[in-house]
Image (tube, coloured by chain):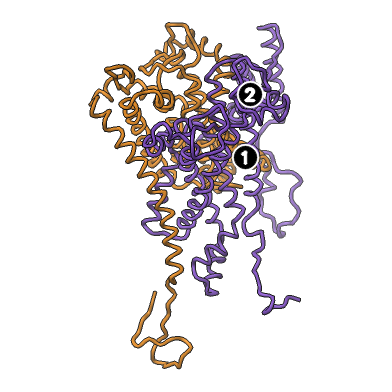
């Protein structure tokens, strides 16, 4: 706060005791320049996301103009030829199916991993286990893709056959063509493994904030450790876990390379998840973008815009729920 | 409440009675175990495991074996696990009652599932080493130097290589690092020093940007940079913009968390001594956490090195060396491995594993460096104050 009194008296000159000193703790000119530089840098970040949204919207206009509402009502996507069709329902459904499956795979494993690191593992092993989970997060998605294609595809073959024979009371698991692999199911598992680190680290962070005295009270009352987990830790961490799941869902929706490698795409609504077929927005874009003509590129941009907007909203909601999860680097 | 044991274990009444003498300093020799029952836990586990082995042997006639680096029947594994859990549950509930059985089953499940999370990691790393190391090691530096221009689908292992991709990766990631590091460090400083409405907005946007799908970054750069330039638009530089967009939020968030660790008293001390705020930021705060900031940068680089999708429409990939990142298509490591796999010829897939091995080696090295740097606590490094020799003579 600057206190200014007329006439100003500078410190160090003859002092009139009745007139207060001018105190100027505000920012100097150098400070203002510095903060301006900081704001410019932050502005670049805003500019980046603004530019992404603007360009996606501008370039998606021609396709929307051409196809109208059929973009979100029909499921046939054929960008080549004289009369291209741009129905996105098939890939939308496929993307959501992969993401939901991924969350189903990741959720139990992540909660267990978070509990293991926080409550069950010996104190010394905690840092190592956290490091290993973080390492899972930095492994390139290409590797998960190759692993899914070359290893898991054949390893999981018997399981998928068994599922299609013995669990066919669930319509999704029926497989009339008796061909297995390269499926939405497999993509769901691989993408699920890829989002385990983010769900785990967010839930672990929230669980570690559970009130320690309540935990100890539960144990002191003669409760078992599992009782403490179900009655104190999980209720406390419920919201945080939900936030972590939403963040994982966002990642799963946007995963490209692993799905592109594993899935044999048909871009139609495919309800038999154990066999080849189905679609996925990022994989569709990556697969076709360089080969299709102008209008097709525009249609793919529409798909990208839909995906990006969905993920932004999901992330926003997730961050609101979790608050700001701490990023630990130690 | 299900957490409470129905029949609480009898606690020695003497131990609970308040004693007249002041509490003695010596601690009890061992903590009282509240879990009832004298049979140690591992014996139950062992018994259940033995029962499982016997059952599997009776049913299939072969002992249980599992080789992690080769293809395995996942179904058998899951069945074994479930059988083991069933045996173990029945055994403990007969010995100790339902509640303890529930607790121990939960413990087993949590350990199993938690370790299952690490299983893919182990298998991926093993597979990459088993498949990729021989490719890289054959005629050792050849694979790191040659490009794919002359390597046909039936060419032997030493004709092709990842040299062009390594050059491309280095240039693209290097360029991206050059312009993301200053921006992200400044933004992180701004976010931690200011609490205005603008900084809250930036923080929200950065949080949302964290989940940008990598393909969208590639799509954007294609529309923004490559498309207006026609067929000559593909370049390593375009790829570096896309990578930069993905690196920014990661670096900003990590750096901001690091800067937050700096104690406020340090800042206040500097301000109280009359430093202007820019000097406090640049000369006191940032140098204090320089190892953490380096960690943030390295984490960003480690993520960018492995990204494939954003470079698909920007660098586009190439079979030959291209040292100029500003002109012409350029390869990079994950992209080249990806494209080789898509060619689906046996030898190309073999070379792709080689590329994946180099990639894993790079990412692991970066990750370990980041860990080591990040684990040194902020503030441990003494702040060196430069003194002018003329004025102060240090004895």
Residue B285: quarter of image: bottom right
Instruction: Give me the chain that's orange.
Output: A
Residue A238: quarter of image: top left
Q: Which residue is mark 2?
A: B160
Q: Nearer the viewer, residue A293 or A171?
A: A293
Please tell me if label 2 and label 1 are on a single chain. Answer: no
Instruction: Give the label on residue B246, or none.
Output: none
The relative height of residue B247 versus residue A42 in the rendered view (above or below) is above
Decide if residue A82 is on the left or right side of residue A215: left
Decide if residue B231 is on the left or right side of residue A72: right
Chain for numbered disc 1: A
Q: Which residue is mark 1?
A: A131
Determine the secondary structure under disc 2. Answer: loop
Determine the secondary structure under disc 1. Answer: helix
Q: Position of residue B62 (x, y in %)?
A: 70, 8
Whole-Å distance between the Cαs marked 2 and 1?
35 Å
Per the rendering, the colour in which chain B appears is: purple
């Amino acid at each position: 706060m600057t206190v200014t009194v007329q006439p100003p008296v500078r410190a160090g000159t003859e002092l009139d005791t009745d007139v207060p000193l001018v105190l100027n703790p505000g920012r100097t000119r150098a400070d203002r320049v510095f903060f301006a530089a900081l704001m410019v840098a932050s502005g670049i970040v805003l500019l980046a996301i603004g530019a992404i949204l603007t360009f996606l919207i501008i370039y998606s206009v021609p396709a929307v103009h051409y196809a109208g509402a059929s973009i979100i009502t029909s499921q046939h996507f054929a960008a080549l030829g004289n009369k291209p069709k741009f129905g996105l329902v098939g890939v939308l459904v496929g993307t959501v199916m992969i993401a939901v499956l991924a969350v189903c795979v990741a959720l139990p494993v992540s909660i267990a991993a978070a509990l293991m690191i926080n409550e069950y593992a010996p104190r010394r092993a905690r840092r190592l286990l956290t490091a290993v989970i973080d390492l899972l997060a930095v492994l390139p998605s290409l590797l998960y893709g190759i692993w899914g294609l070359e290893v898991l595809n054949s390893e999981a073959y018997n399981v998928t056959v068994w599922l299609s024979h013995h669990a066919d009371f669930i319509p999704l698991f029926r497989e009339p063509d008796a061909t297995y692999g390269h499926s939405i199911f497999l993509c769901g598992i691989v993408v699920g493994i890829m989002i385990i680190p983010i769900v785990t680290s967010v839930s672990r962070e929230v669980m570690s904030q559970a009130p320690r005295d309540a935990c100890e009270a539960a144990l002191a009352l003669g409760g078992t450790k599992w009782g403490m987990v179900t009655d104190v830790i999980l209720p406390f961490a419920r919201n945080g876990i939900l936030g972590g799941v939403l963040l994982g869902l966002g990642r799963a929706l946007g995963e490209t390379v692993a799905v592109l490698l594993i899935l044999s795409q048909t871009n139609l609504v495919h309800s038999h998840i154990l066999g080849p077929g189905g679609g996925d927005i990022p994989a569709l874009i990556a697969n076709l973008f360089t080969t299709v003509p102008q209008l097709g590129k525009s249609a793919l941009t529409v798909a990208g815009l839909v995906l990006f907007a969905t993920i932004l909203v999901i992330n926003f909601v997730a961050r609101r729920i979790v608050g700001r999860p701490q990023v630990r680097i130690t | 409440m299900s957490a409470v044991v129905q029949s609480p274990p009898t606690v020695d009444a003497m131990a609970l009675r308040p004693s007249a003498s002041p509490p003695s300093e010596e601690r009890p020799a061992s903590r009282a175990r509240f879990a009832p029952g004298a049979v140690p836990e591992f014996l139950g586990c062992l018994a259940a495991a033995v029962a499982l082995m016997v059952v599997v042997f009776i049913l299939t006639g072969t002992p249980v074996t599992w080789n992690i680096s080769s293809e395995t029947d996942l179904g058998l594994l899951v069945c074994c696990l479930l059988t083991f859990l069933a045996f173990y549950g029945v055994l403990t509930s007969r010995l100790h009652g339902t509640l303890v059985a529930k607790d121990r089953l939960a413990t087993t499940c949590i350990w199993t599932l938690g370790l299952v999370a690490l299983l893919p990691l182990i298998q991926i790393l093993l597979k990459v080493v088993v498949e990729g190391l021989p490719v890289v090691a054959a005629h050792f530096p050849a694979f790191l130097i040659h490009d794919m221009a002359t390597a046909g689908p039936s060419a032997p292992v030493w004709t092709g290589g990842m040299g062009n991709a390594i050059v491309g990766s280095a240039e693209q990631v290097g360029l991206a690092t050059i312009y993301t590091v200053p921006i992200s460090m400044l933004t992180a400083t701004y976010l931690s020093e200011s609490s205005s409405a603008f900084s809250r907005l930036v923080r929200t946007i950065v949080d949302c940007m964290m989940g940008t799908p990598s393909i969208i970054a590639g799509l954007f750069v294609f529309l923004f940079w490559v498309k207006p330039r026609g067929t000559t638009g593909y370049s390593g530089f375009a790829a570096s913009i896309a990578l930069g967009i993905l690196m920014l939020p990661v670096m900003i968030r990590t750096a901001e968390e690091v800067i937050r660790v700096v104690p406020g008293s340090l800042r206040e001390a500097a301000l109280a001594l009359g430093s202007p705020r820019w000097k406090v930021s640049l000369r006191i705060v940032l140098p204090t956490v320089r190892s953490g900031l380096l960690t943030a940068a390295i984490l960003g680089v480690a993520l960018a090195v492995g990204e494939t999708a954003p470079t698909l429409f920007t660098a586009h990939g190439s079979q030959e060396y291209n040292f100029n990142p500003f002109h012409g298509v350029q390869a990079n490591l994950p992209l080249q491995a990806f494209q080789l796999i898509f060619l689906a010829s046996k030898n190309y897939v073999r070379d792709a594993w080689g590329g994946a091995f180099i990639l894993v080696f790079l990412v692991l090295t970066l990750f370990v460096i980041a860990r080591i740097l990040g684990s040194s606590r902020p503030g441990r490094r003494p702040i060196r104050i430069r003194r002018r020799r003329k004025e102060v003579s240090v004895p």
